[in-house]
Amino acid sequence: MRIDIVNIKPIKVAALEHLDNPETLAESVEAFRAWRKESGCSPVAKKRTFGIAYSNPEARPAQKFRFDVCGEVDMNIAENAYGVVNKAIPGGRYAKLRHRGSHDKLGQKVNALYRTWLPNSNEMKRDSALFFEYMNVVPEVLEAELITDIYFPLKPLR
């Protein structure tokens, strides 16, 4: 497992907040895609796509699962019928791990970061959500060809 320590600047995003059962996340993704196409504020060919994971779908009651579906933006977005809001991914230090393949396997990599890498790394988790950057998406590529970068928030060096 190759982990890179990176520093990022804050990223301004439009976010659709999902607070529901993990099994219904696909519905939120589709709603966000519809907003993205309709608004033109975050064109998928020119702006990055993210997911912010505030909770582990395996460790929380299903109805408390919290995840933001996001697209990078340059401007503040207006109030809209989809409920998409302005947010920012915090800048700072992150452990970055690249995942290849199905999103169904992302949880295994996240668990490895928490349970294996972090205790042996001399690093400490920052009080911030981890996030995913989706480098490509289905249907543009096959599920086996998906590339997702996982960003795990770290405390600053002293």
Image (spheres, helix red, strand yellow):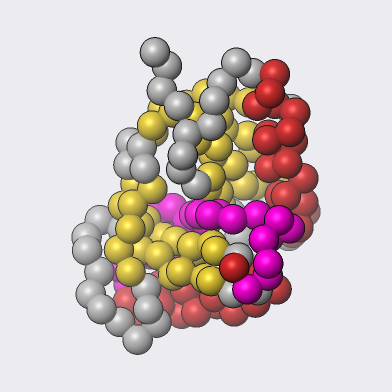
The quadrant the C terminus occupies is top left
Would you say residue 42 sits in the magenta stretch?
A: yes
Residue farthest along the bottom direction in this orientation:
81
Q: Is residue 121 above or below residue 84?
A: above
Please tell me which residue is depicted at 59% across the width and 55% down the height of the picture: 55
**Which part of the image, by quadrant, shows the N terminus?**
top right
Q: Give the magenta-colored segment's residue range.
A: 40-63
* Viewer can see residue 151: yes
Residue 71, quarter of the rendered image? bottom left
In the image, what residue occupies the spot 71% across and 56% down? 59
Q: Position of residue 49 (x, y in %)?
A: 47, 56
In-front residue for pair 127/38: 127
Q: Horizontal and vertical percent for residue 10?
A: 32, 42
Q: Main secondary structure of the magenta part?
A: loop
Q: On the rendered structure, is 35 left or right of 51?
A: left
Is 67 included in the stretch rendered in magenta? no
The x, y position of residue 97, in whole percent, is: 63, 34
Tell me: 61 left or right of 105: left
Above-or-below relation of 51 to 108:
below
Q: State the image quarter where residue 62 is shown.
A: bottom right
Say which residue appears at 70% left-offset and 18% top-offset: 120
